[in-house]
Structures are given as C-alpha cells and as structure tokens.
C-alpha cells in the first residue's frame, strides 16, 4: 500500500512534516512539528534525529514519541549510517587536560543509546564531513588518518581497528555493494608526483590495487560508486585553471572499473565540450550515468557503466541532473545563476531518452525526486536566497502540482518511506505524456523561439551575411524556426540530441561506402523482391549464379572492380540476398552453396564441350578433357542434393 | 654508378615565409608557438604546409562536378581522414569545411597538446618533457614524439606508461640511487 508522500521542511523556528499532495498540509499522525536547530531523518524512514541545545533527540517518525535522548552538548554535524542503526555526532574540537584532543566524534548505537566508537578530530568542517564512513550494511566503519585508513568492524564491536596502509590518501569512499570490500581512494599531488585515483581491495592482509590512474592538476576529488559496486567515477577538481579559461578552476571526470579483469578500461571520460563538469549522477540501478559538462550552454550525455557514450541529450542552460529513485526518469535542470529550466526525460531501454516535458522553476536552490518517483520537488532556501522562499512540486511531465511559500525556509527534503511501503516502478502513463507534452513543450519552445523571432527583422552587418559565416555558425541554426542563423547564449544551435552510434568493427576501404542513397534504395528493393521470389519457389540457379560472383567479390573486399561504386552496390545486393536466404536455415545454406558450385562447374563443362566441338579435341588440355568426362558424376550429385541441372 | 643513398626520395616538409620581417605574421606565429609549446617556427611552418596541401586537394576536388567519380572517391577518403584525426566532426560532412580549417585545428591534435589538455601534465612544456622522457603511452605503445597526431579513437587511451614511475612502475634512477644511499647510510650509522 503506498503511503502518502511526506516532506520535511525546516524554518528557523521549527522543523515540520507536510504530507499529502497537492494540498501539502501539516501531518496529523506521527511527527508534525518540533523545535529544532537541525533535523535529519534516518535512511530507513523510522527515526528522526533532532539537534537541541542539550543534545540530540531521536524521535520515532511513526508516532512522534521520543525514543532516545543523547547527551551531547554543542553538536555541529550529524550523520546517519546506511541502515539507520548508528548515528555519528561531531562536536567542536577542544583539548583535554592532558593535552590530547577531546574525543569529539562519537558514533552512537540508536537502539541502545550507547557510544560504540569515540574518535578525536583536530578540525571539523562541512567539506570533510562525514569523517566516519560506513560500509555496506553497516558492517564496518572507516576512518581516515594520514597514510592509513582504519577499518572498525561491527562484528568485533568496533573495538579493534584493521589498518589499511594507503600512502598519502587524502579522501576515500568504501564500496556500497554488499560482499565487496573495496575502497576508492584519492592520493593528492605531492612533490612533483601526480595525483592518483585508485580502487583498492582491502579484504586481505595487505591492500591490493585493482585499478589506478594518475593525473596532474587535481587538488581534491569526490568519488561516486555505482550501486552494484562495479565502477567508480572520480571528479577531480583544481582551484586554478592552468588553461586560463575559467576563473573558478577546472574539474575533470575519470572512470575506474572496480574489477581486476577490466582494469585497463580506466580512462578519462571524454566530453565533446571543454569546460568544468557541473554534475555527474549514477542511475540508482547502476547501469548508466549522466554527465552535465562544458561551458554554458553545457552538454548533457548519457554513458553506460563501461563508460561508452550512449545518448546525447543536447546542450542548454543546465547544471544539475537528478535520477528518479528507480532510474526511469531523468530531470535535467539549471539552478544557481541559471534561469531554472527543467527538462524531464523518460529513459527507455538501451539508453534512448525521450523528452516528456519541460518547465521552469525560477531561483531554486535544491531539487529532489520523491521516493515514489513520480514527483519532483524544487525548493528555494534561505542562506542562499532570503526572499521568495518556497517549495514547488512538479509531476514528471512538468505540470506544477503545488507551491507553498514560506517566510524563511532553511531546508526542504522528502522523508524516506517508512518501512513496509514499497513504491511501484511504473512507466510513464500514455495519457499524461500526451497531455503534458503540449503544456510543457510550450515552455521550452518559448525559451528558444524568443531568440529566434527577433533576428527575423534584425539588421545583420555585412560581415555576418556571407556564406562563410553561415558555415561557421552551423546551417542547422534553422532548427529553432528562425529565418537565418540565430544567436543565443543559452541555446547552442548546432547541438543535436540523439543516439550516439558506436563505430562498427570492420573498417571499410576508403570510398567503398559512397553508394548514393537512391542506388542503395533500389538495390535493397531488388534484393527484397528476389528474396520473396526465392522464398516461394525453389532456389533458382539463375539468380543464385548472379549472386555468387557478387558475394565472392564482396568477400574479397576488392575495389578492383571497374567502378568502386559497384563494390558497394554488389555488397548491398549480397547482403540483402544473404538475409533473404538466411530464412532457409544453416544446413540448407550449405547445400545450396554446393549446388550452386556444381551448377557453375556444369556450365564450364558445357563451354568446354562447345570449344571441343568447334576447335577439335586437341585444342583442350588433358585436365579439361577429364572435366568433361566427369559431367555425369556432377549431374548425379546435383540431383542428389535436390537442385536442378 | 651514383651512391645508392641518392635514390632515396625526400622532400621538404616546411616552407619558409616570403617576407622575413612582417610584424603581424611574427606576432601571430609567436602566439601560436607559445600557446602550443612548439620548439621553433619550423614546427609551425610544417603544420602550415600540411594544411595547405590538404586545402589544395580539397580545392581541386571542388572544381570537379558533384557526381564525378574521382571527386566522390577522393572526397570521401579525404573526409574520412579528417574525421579519423578529429579535425572535423561528423556533422561537418561537406568538402567546404576542409577549406575552413586552420593551423590551430592541427595543433590541437598533437600529442603534446592533448597530454596537457587531459590533465596529465602541469603545463604545455611539462607535457613535452614527459613525452620526450617516455612517460606517456597511447594505448599500449609508448610514444616519444610530441607532434604525434592523435586519432579520435586513441584519444581516450592516453595515459602514463606502465614502466614509468608515474604510472605504477619502479622509481627512476635518481630516486633509486638516493634511496640506496640513504639505506646504506643508515646501515653505516648502525
């Protein structure tokens, strides 16, 4: 049974739960509102950790009762573990009497309220949080110190630490897939040595490097594992841009496989456009990832889990990408200093993406899909924007379902579904697609054609009127409907969304593929007709005889035919006839081939006979005379195989 | 009989400019040499000669009729080479685009530029040093030549060589020696 969707909103005074679309009213049962400086829900949807002055209260989300109260004054940061079994709190760093740093990082067991792990950290800041990383199923907690990663296992009660030596590791992330003890680690540049991104197997005594990639110009990296744990994406960033193109620094995306057998597939993800990587997101299923990269208008591409580009979603003013929890819908949006266009795509099988709708949510700061995967929420929140705080919810074709304004909104997020509710992964409904497409498409077209309508009457200086400039600007600018090449900073007129075709294996000799379209169409029509006729009757010796030398010529790949175009045409013919004959089955093919060869031999024998009759037996070689004598056996074999002599 | 080596055919790969001291040309060439880390003007003139030969070929083909057999065959072959080396992309499918190429397009496809652009080197000069010192491989082959024209298929496979200390091999000669000296010194101290 699908429960109603719940939204957690936090204002400076209270944190409250709103429920039910489209009305978004305060929740009646469970937690409705509580005074809290910070409220973080657990990933399994059962508990809520609220920070108060005295400490941290753990509240049950189902009935609002306070389960536990942890006495931790001055909590700065909070983090739940993956299953919600443990809670990590961080206090301000301070010194104890004996000079040692106080144990300000504490991991609590949320069932009992006792501390399971205590660590001291000299500095606590948001960029380096969480300091304690949890493995799959909370079986192990990982803590990084200089040159080592400490692994505390749950089975041992977090008492002993297994030391994993990784020299110079500045950041790491454990694999989220169960059963795999892998760590993705980033070693920063030091003393002329390049930075290294590596995947390490830490199950044995010594860590074993599975795959590794070195590069310069990277001061930090964030790592993204995919859900099944087969690959990691490293986004390496640098504060200064050595190419002097961007004031904000540069970022690069690297792909590392997590399997030893595929270790040489490690590569830099090649983006067709230069510029920083704005966003990378793995699909929750782990089979595709989407990259938004390049100077504005950024290019959006879908790649599969072996880092092969599959689909090009075009370019536009986009900076974020969000997958729905099932990996079925994809929302590409432009937040920050962009106007806030949102485009919704439906990812079909094999990676093809169809646009479902588009809308605009101006001045939004954060965005997320609902746990049911049908609604998309954008929020305008306070530290970034102090006016126009609101929460907007759209459905997957871009229609706005509801909007709720606030005086000051600090944070808005969906609550994870309570245990026991599962949402169905339903495809897009056809009626909704048909209805939404009209409304949403207008928004996108309006954005594009606003630029197109103006130049219809605009003056173009002589430098812009020439043919050369048409070529430079890309003749495809006409696609936006304008009368000539249009200029728009937001939309790149030469970008064409579509399937990215992989280059096929066999390379063609130069010039072999230039058969004109009309010629190849006619060849295909003829081949289809022949296949139909061949399928009805017996295999005709005459037409097979024509196809056989053609097939032989194409098989040799020879361009030694008179005009190279003939090679292309005959190859098309051979291809079409082979496909027509393929219906006959494998054995029948071999038999037909033998029959054809024998019929050719028979024809040659006839020719030799004619020569013998006209010129006399002495004109023929002894082997040729032998061939004539073998005529009877050839005829017998043809009859046996079922052909006609 | 003349010396056997006189039978080797060879030709010049660069053309010196007609006017030696033209201010605009000198400025433009210096800018390119600095931007792409070339060793001398001859490397730039070499690229300009390659470009001019390709442009001549495209120009003569464009004077033929549209469906002429030679134009179709050689035109396709020329376009295929442009796509293979990344000088044109798949959307630019007319011979006219070949006439719009510039030396910068060729210079962008050198291994030295790509090693720098992909972040394997700190600067364009560092890239040249790394290539020359055999730290860079394309696919499985260690490439020692900064002016190697990288194909589009090979671009993904530019990485540090496996035997290089940056790519996971053993440390270089100097480091090994200093480590041995340090180790020997510690033993002596003991």
Image (cartoon, rainbow, N blue to C red):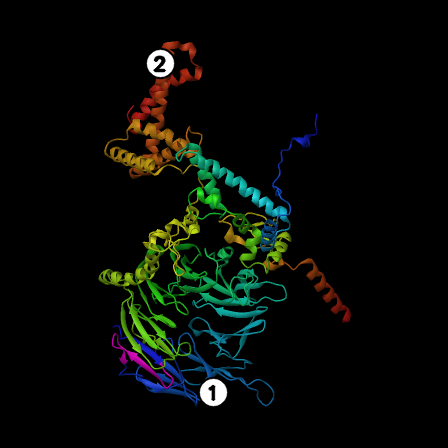
Q: Are marks 1 and 2 in contact (CB under 8 Å)?
A: no
The answer to which of A87 and B82 lies nearer the viewer is B82
Q: Of tags 1 and 2, which is closer to the observer?
A: 1
Q: Which subunit holds the residue at mark 2?
A: A
Residue A92: percent from left, percent from top: 51, 84
The reply to whether residue A587 is in sight is no
Residue A399: percent from left, percent from top: 27, 67
Q: Which mark is residue A610?
A: 2
State yes or no: residue A13 in magenta.
yes
Q: Which mark is residue A74?
A: 1
Q: Is residue A421 above or below residue A531?
A: below
Q: Describe residue B42's horizontal placement relative to residue A557 as left or right.
A: right
Q: Residue at x 34, y 18 (%)?
A: A606
Q: In the picture, which quadrant includes the C terminus of chain A?
A: top left
Q: Residue at x 64, y 55 (%)?
A: B129
Q: Which subunit holds the residue at mark 1?
A: A
Segment tinted magenta in the rendering = A10-25
Residue A179: percent from left, percent from top: 44, 67
The answer to which of B19 and A530 lies nearer the viewer is B19
Q: Mark 2 packing: few (<14 Cα in 10 Å), some, or many (20+)?
A: few
The reply to whether residue A159 is in sight is yes
């Amino acid at each position: 049974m699908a429960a109603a969707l719940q939204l957690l909103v936090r204002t400076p005074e209270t944190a409250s739960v709103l429920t039910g679309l489209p009305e978004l009213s305060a929740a009646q049962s469970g937690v409705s509102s509580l005074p809290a400086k910070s409220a973080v829900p657990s990933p399994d949807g059962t508990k809520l950790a609220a920070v108060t002055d005295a400490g941290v209260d753990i509240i049950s989300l189902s009935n609002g009762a306070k389960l536990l109260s942890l006495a931790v004054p001055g909590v700065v940061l909070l983090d739940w573990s993956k299953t919600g079994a443990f809670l990590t709190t961080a206090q301000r760093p301070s010194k104890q009497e004996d000079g040692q740093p106080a144990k300000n990082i504490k991991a609590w067991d949320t069932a009992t309220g006792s501390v399971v792990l205590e660590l001291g950290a000299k500095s606590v800041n948001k960029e380096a949080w969480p300091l304690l990383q949890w493995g799959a199923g909370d079986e192990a907690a990982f803590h990084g110190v200089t040159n080592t990663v400490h692994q505390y296992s749950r089975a041992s009660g977090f008492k002993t630490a297994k030391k994993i030596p990784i020299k110079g590791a500045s950041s790491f992330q454990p694999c989220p897939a169960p059963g795999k003890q892998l760590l993705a680690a980033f070693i920063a540049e030091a003393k002329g040595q390049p930075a290294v991104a590596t995947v390490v197997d830490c199950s044995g005594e010594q860590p074993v490097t599975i795959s590794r990639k070195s590069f310069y110009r990277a001061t930090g990296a964030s790592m993204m594992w995919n859900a099944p744990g087969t690959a990691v994406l490293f986004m390496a960033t640098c504060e200064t841009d050595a190419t002097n193109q961007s004031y904000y620094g540069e970022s690069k995306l690297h792909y590392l496989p997590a399997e030893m057998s595929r270790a040489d597939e490690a590569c830099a993800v090649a983006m067709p456009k230069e510029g920083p990587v704005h966003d990378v997101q793995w699909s929750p299923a782990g089979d595709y990832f989407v990259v938004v990269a390049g100077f504005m208008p950024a290019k959006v591409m879908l790649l599969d889990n072996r880092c092969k580009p599959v689909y090009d979603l075009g370019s536009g003013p986009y900076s974020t990408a969000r997958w729905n929890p099932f990996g079925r819908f994809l929302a590409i949006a432009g937040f920050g200093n962009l106007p806030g266009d949102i485009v919704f795509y439906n990812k079909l099988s094999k990676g093809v993406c169809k646009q479902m709708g588009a809308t605009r949510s101006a001045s939004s700061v954060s965005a997320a899909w609902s746990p049911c995967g049908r609604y998309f929420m954008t929020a305008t929140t306070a530290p970034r924007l102090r006016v126009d705080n609101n929460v907007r919810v759209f459905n997957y074709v871009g229609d706005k379902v509801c909007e709720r304004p606030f005086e000051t909104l600090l944070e808005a997020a969906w609550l994870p579904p309570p245990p026991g509710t599962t949402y169905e992964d339903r495809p897009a409904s056809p009626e909704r697609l048909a209805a939404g497409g009209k409304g949403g498409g207008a928004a996108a077209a309006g954005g594009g054609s606003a630029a197109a309508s103006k130049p219809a009457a605009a003056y173009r200086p002589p430098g812009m009127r020439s043919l050369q400039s048409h070529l430079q600007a890309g003749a495809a600018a006409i696609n936006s409907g304008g009368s000539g090449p249009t200029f728009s900073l937001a939309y790149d007129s030469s970008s064409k969304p579509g399937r990215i075709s992989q280059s096929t294996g066999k390379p063609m000799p130069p010039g072999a593929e230039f058969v004109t379209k009309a010629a190849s169409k006619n060849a295909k029509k003829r081949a289809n007709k022949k296949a139909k006729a061949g399928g009805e009757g017996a295999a005709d010796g005459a037409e097979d005889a024509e196809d056989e030398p053609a097939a032989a010529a194409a098989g040799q790949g020879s361009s030694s035919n008179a005009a190279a175009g003939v090679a292309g045409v005959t190859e098309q013919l051979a291809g079409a006839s082979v496909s027509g004959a393929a219906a006959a089955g494998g054995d029948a093919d071999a038999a037909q081939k033998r029959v054809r060869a024998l019929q050719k031999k028979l024809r040659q024998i006839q020719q030799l006979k004619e020569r013998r009759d006209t010129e006399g037996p002495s004109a023929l070689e002894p082997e040729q005379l032998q061939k004539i004598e073998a005529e009877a056996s050839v005829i017998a074999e043809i009859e046996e195989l079922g052909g006609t002599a | 009989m003349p010396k056997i080596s006189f039978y080797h055919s060879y030709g010049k790969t660069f053309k010196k400019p007609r006017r030696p001291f033209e201010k605009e040309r000198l400025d433009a060439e210096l800018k390119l040499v600095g931007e792409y880390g070339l060793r001398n003007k001859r490397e730039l003139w070499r690229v300009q000669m390659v470009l001019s030969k390709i442009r001549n070929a495209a120009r003569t083909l464009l004077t033929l009729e549209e469906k002429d057999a030679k134009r179709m065959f050689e035109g396709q072959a020329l376009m295929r080479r442009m796509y293979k080396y990344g000088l044109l992309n798949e959307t630019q499918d007319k011979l006219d685009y070949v006439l719009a190429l510039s030396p910068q397009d060729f210079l962008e496809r050198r291994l030295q530029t790509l090693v720098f652009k992909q972040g394997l080197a700190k600067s364009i000069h560092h890239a040249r040093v790394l290539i020359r010192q055999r730290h860079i491989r394309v696919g499985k082959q260690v490439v020692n030549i900064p002016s190697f024209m990288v194909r589009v298929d090979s671009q993904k496979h530019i990485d540090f060589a496996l035997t290089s200390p940056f790519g996971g091999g053993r440390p270089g000669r100097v480091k090994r020696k200093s480590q041995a000296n340090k180790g020997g010194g510690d033993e002596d101290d003991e």
